[in-house]
Amino acid sequence: MSRSYISVELRRLVVNRAQQLCEYCLIHENDTFYGCQVDHIISEKHGGLTLAENLAYACTFCNRCKGSDVGSIVLHSGEFSRFFNPRIDQWADHFMLDGAMIVALTDIGRVTAKILDFNNAERLLERQTLQKMGNYPCAAALKRMIV
């Protein structure tokens, strides 16, 4: 498969598997102004392939913040930790929702929340507004938030 080309069939598989949710912050693509994109979990730059098991659906904000990074340094320990990987990790094992705030529960969650900037003021306001409208978390996102 050529680098960066994602076929219509593969894109459809990724979107349907994600239930049209950003697999990182769990916002529905219809609830974010800029929509969602297919993301390489391990970027091509780091040897990641354009295969279903290395692709996730990500909102523009999560995808932009993540870039080609694969992890970060955990502040309290100074150790490197990989990011949350929606193909192998369960969201509820690493995060919980507290109001509109996405709270990290593990080192994987902490580095992901920090680098993807889950709780900046604009994203909190977006989730608070969606909560008032009854749109966040949507039913599909709620299922991922339960252990």
Image: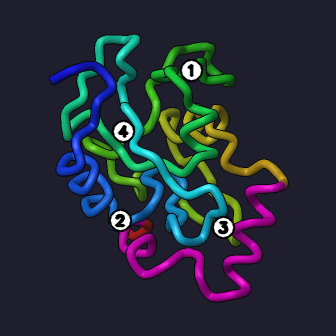
Badge 2 vs badge 4, beta-carbon distance below 8 Å = no
Tag 2 or tag 3, which sits nearer the N-term?
3
Q: Amino acid at mark 4?
A: Asn
10 Å crowding of disc 1: few (<14), some (14-19), many (20+)? some
- Label 1 belongs to which residue? 72
Dot 3 corresponds to which residue?
Answer: 98
At 28% from the left and 49% from the top, the residue drawn is 11
Question: Mark 4 against mark 3, which lies toward the viewer?
Answer: 4
Name the amino acid, label 2: Val
Classify 75 as above or below 117: above
- Distance from disc 4 to disc 1, alpha carbons, whole Å, reads 13 Å
The circle drawn on residue 147 is 2
Compare marks 3 and 1 and give the one earlier in the sequence: 1
Q: Secondary structure at mark 3?
A: strand
- Of residue 109 and residue 125, the one placed in the foreground of this image is 125
Report the residue at 24% width, 23% height from top.
49
Q: What secondary structure prevails in the magenta region? A: helix
Amino acid type assigned to the residue bearing label 3 in the image: Asp
Helix, strand or loop at mark 4: loop
Relative image position of residue 15 (x, y in whole percent): 32, 58
Q: Earlier in the sequence, mark 4 or mark 1?
A: 1
CA gap, disc 2 and disc 4: 16 Å
Q: Secondary structure at mark 1?
A: strand
